[in-house]
Amino acid sequence: MIDLLAHNALLVSLAAVAFGAILTPVTIRTGRREWLQLVYGAVYANFLLVSIAAVSMVVALVTHDFSVSYVAQVGSRSTPLLFTVISLWGALEGSILFWAWVLGLYSAAVVALHRRRLGNLVPYAVMTLLAVAAFFAILLVGPADPFLPVFPVPADGPGPNTLLQNHYLMAVHPPLLYLGYVGMSVPFAFALGAIFSNEAASNDWSILSRRWMLTSWGFLSAAIIAGMWWSYEVLGWGGYWAWDPVENASFLPWLTATAYLHSVMVQERRNMLRLWTLNLCVATFVLTILGTFLTRSGILSSVHAFTTGAIGYYFLAFIAIVLVTTLMLVAGNSERIQTKGKLGGAASRETVFLLNNLFLTAVMLTVLVGTLYPLVAEAVRGVKVSVGVPFFNRMALPAMVSLLFLMGVGPALPWGSTTWADARKRLYPPGIAAMILGAIAVIAGARSVYAILAFAFVGYAAMSNVREFWIGMRARHRAHGESWPTALVRLVAGNRRRYGGYVAHIGVLLIALGITASSTFRSEREATLTPGQTLTVAGHTVRLKNLWGREEPQRSVIGATMDVVGKNGAIIGTMEPRMNYYRVSDQPVPTPAVRSSITGDLYVNLMAFESSGANATVKVIVEPFVPWIWFGGLVIVIGAIIGLGYGGRSATAPAPATNPAPSIASADS
C-alpha cells in the first residue's frame, strides 16, 4: 500500500513539474501573469508530493517492509534505528529521492522568498528549477524507482553498506553534501533566468543568486570537511584526503563556487566579469551533476561509489543537454552580457580577485583532468590508467599555495588604483608574520619548499586578514569611544559581507595550516605487542592492556584496550581501537581510536590480532594540528553565515527589458 501511494505521488510530481515548466513561457508570452500562481503552485505541489514519497520510504525502512525494492536492498532487521533511517541516502535510488526532495525544498524556498519580485527573472528561474526537477522525477519513475515491488518478499535484507553504518557521520556528511550540491541549482536557475528575461545586463540577478550560492557553498564546505573527518575516523589509514575521484567530484564545484563569490564582487563594484560570473554559475551546476554521475553511475572504483547500473547514461544525456543549451544561450547573448569596466591597476583588489579566479580555475581544470582522464583512456583505448596522489600534488599544489598568498594580498589592497608606495605600506606589515611562521617551520624540520611557502603564506594571509579587523576596531574605538568587543561587533554588523569573507578566509587558513603541519610532521610506527608492552612515537607512548570482543545486533567487535602513558609513567588516558565484522561482508571495517588536543592527534589503529589474545598489531600515528582542520571548517561556516546577513542593493525591481525572451542564436531578437 505504501509503495503504491509513494509511486503515484512521484508520477503526479512529474506531471506537476512538467506542467509548471511548460506553462511559464506561455504565461509570460501571452501576458497572463495571473497564471504564474499555477506555476508557483506546481512548485509547492512538487515539494509536497516528493515529501510524501520520502516519508513513505522512511516508514518502509523503519517498518522493514521488504516488499519495497529499496528496503530489500539496504534494509535489515538488525540495523540500529539511526542507520535504518539514514539508509534513505545510502544507495542509488534513495539518494536520487533525497536529491529530488532537497531540490523541491530549495525551489519552494525560492518561490516563497522571491515570488513578489517584478519582472520575468524569477518566473524563468523557477521554470529552470522545474526543468531540473523533471529530470530527477523521470529517474524516480524510471531507472531509479525505489518503490518497485519485490516477490517473493525476503524475510530480511543485507543492511546498508558496511562503511555507511560504521560511524555517525553518515547522518551528517551526505545531507550536507546534497544541501550544497542541490543548492547550486538556484544560482544556475537565476543565471538562465537572467538570460531568458533579458536581465543579464544588470546586476540584480547576481545580487539574488549570491546569497543562494553562499548558502550552498557553506553547506558544501561543511560537507567536504565532514567527509574528510569521516574518512579519517573510519578508514583507518590516518589520512583525510587521498584525491579519490569522488572526493575530487565534491571539490570541483567548491572551487568554481569560490571563484564565483569573488567574481561577483568585482562585477558589482567595478562593472566587470559579468559574463565570466554567469559562466561560473553554469560550470558549478554542471560539476554538481557530474559529481552525482561519478558517484552513482558505478563507473568509478571508490570507497564512495556504491552502485552500478545504466543510470549513468541518463546523467550523461542531461549534462550534454545542459551544456549545449547554456553554451548556445550564453554565446547568443554574450554581447549583451559583457561589461565595459576596466581594471584599476596592477595593485588593486580587483586585479588580485582576477588572479584568484585564474588560479582557482587552474586547480579545477587540473583536478578535472586528473579525475576524468582514466575514464576517458579506458573508454577510448581500452587500457586502465591510474592518476594518483603524486600527479595532483605536483600539478595543483603550486596554484593552491599561490592562493594562500593572494588571500593576504587581496584584503590589504583597495578597489581601483593606488600608488605603489601606498601598496607597499599596506602589503609589508604581514610579511613579518610570514617570516616568523616560515622560520618556525624550518626550525621544526620542514624541508619541502611548498611546505615552507605554505606556512609562510598562511602567516602572511592570517596577519593581513586579522589586521583588517584591527584597523576597523581601532577606528571605531577612537571615533566613538566604544569598547573593543563592542567595536568588533558593530564593525562586523556594519559590513557583514566584507568581514564574513575575512572570517571565511581565516577558516581556510586554519585548514591549510592543519593540512600542511599534519602532512609535514606526521610520524608513525607499526608494531606487534603483547599485553604490557609499549610503543613510543614522537614522544607519545601507548601500552597494550588487553584484547576483548563483544557481539552487537548488527556486527561482531574485536577491540584492544591501549593505555596512554605519560612521561612519568602514569596512565593519562585509554584508547580502544576496534575491528567491526559485519555479517554481509568478509572484510572487517576498522574503527581507529583518536585522542585529540589543540596541538594534534594521537591516532591508534588495530591492524591484526591473535584470536587467543596473545598479541595485537597496532599502528600508532602522531599528526600535529589535525583538529585545526575541523575547527577551520566550522570557522568557514560561521563566515558564510555572517556574509549572508549582507543587505546590499535592493533587487526588488528588474532592469529595463525590451523583449520578453532572448533568442538562442542572436542577442538582438
Image (spheres, rainbow, N blue to C red):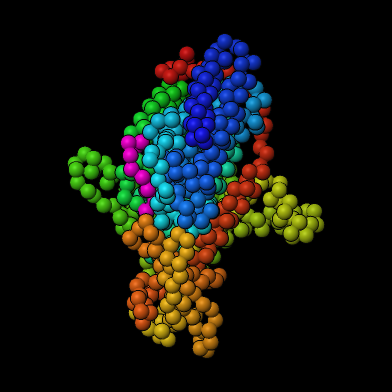
Residue at (42%, 40%) from the top-left corner?
69
Residue at (36%, 36%) from the top-left corner?
311
- Tell me if residue 632 comes above or below residue 216 in the rendering: below
Q: Main secondary structure of the magenta part?
A: loop
Decide if residue 656 is in sight here.
no
Q: Residue furthest right?
A: 481
In the rendered view, does 531 fall on the left or right side of 220? Answer: left
Residue nearer the viewer, 260 or 235: 235
In the rendered view, does 380 fall on the left or right side of 97? Answer: left
Decide if residue 156 is in sight here.
yes
Q: Position of residue 9 (x, y in %)?
A: 52, 29
Residue at (35%, 30%) from the top-left corner?
317
In the rendered view, does 265 fall on the left or right side of 315? Answer: right
Q: Is residue 304 magenta?
A: yes
- Tell me if residue 440 comes above or below residue 85 in the rendering: below
Residue nearer the viewer, 485 or 380: 380
Q: Position of residue 397 (x, y in %)?
A: 38, 55
The part of the chain drawn in magenta is 303-312
Displayed quadrant of residue 644: top right
Q: Position of residue 151 (x, y in %)?
A: 38, 38
Q: Residue furthest bottom?
A: 568
- Tell me if residue 288 comes above or below residue 399 in the rendering: above
Q: Position of residue 360 (x, y in %)?
A: 44, 46
